[in-house]
Amino acid sequence: MSEPLFVTACSLTKEVGGVAQYEGGAAILDSVGRREAGVLLDRRNAVRELVKGGSDTDWQGVPLADHPHNRALAKGHDFGGTRRVEYLPAIDRYQGRFFVALDTESRRRCKAQKRTLVLSGLYGMLLRGSRFSSTAVH
């Protein structure tokens, strides 16, 4: 019997901080071919540029570029770059209603579930253990 697939959306509210060392292996980019990873990185960076500089793109009337998490987006390993940023697993980074409602056991099960995916507007599909950045390390 195969494990069920669980998909959830990301959240606008995010935990800050993390660790500076990027741990590959849990990211979708690490599980696809080189060509596919290149395409994903190109698309991810196009969205990152839109979010960082797009004054005509907004969320509830506020330009996306003005959101604190978006202003600090840097091109770290998760975007194919070399900037030093802080990483947390997706399940720990997001702090929206769904994520804060998880009790300790539910959070543990999400982390252990190999087929948990998070749908992010910026990153696309994230594996539950994917580490991604929120801000550059100054």
Image: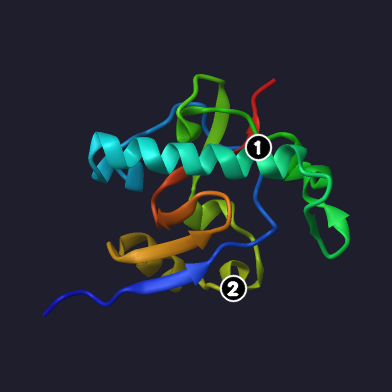
The answer, for residue 132, to whether it is visible in the render is no
Q: Circle 2 sits on which residue? A: 98
Q: Residue at x 15, y 76 (%)?
A: 2
Q: Quadrant of the N terminus?
A: bottom left
Q: Residue at x 36, y 35 (%)?
A: 38
Q: Residue at x 25, y 45 (%)?
A: 31
**Local SS, label 1:** helix
How crowded pointer 2 is (Cα within 10 Å; few <14, some 14-19, many 20+) is rated as few
Return the residue found at the far left: 1
Estimate the x, y position of residue 76 in percent, counting from the top left: 53, 28
Q: Residue at x 42, y 30 (%)?
A: 22
Check disc 2 and give the amino acid type.
Answer: Phe
Q: Against 71, is 14 above or below?
A: below
- Residue 32: name its quadrant: top left
Q: Quadrant of the C terminus?
A: top right
- Residue 3: name its quadrant: bottom left
How many numbered markers are drawn?
2
Q: Which mark is residue 49?
A: 1
Q: Which mark is residue 99?
A: none
Residue in the foreground of this view, choosing between 59 and 22: 59
Return the residue found at the far right: 61
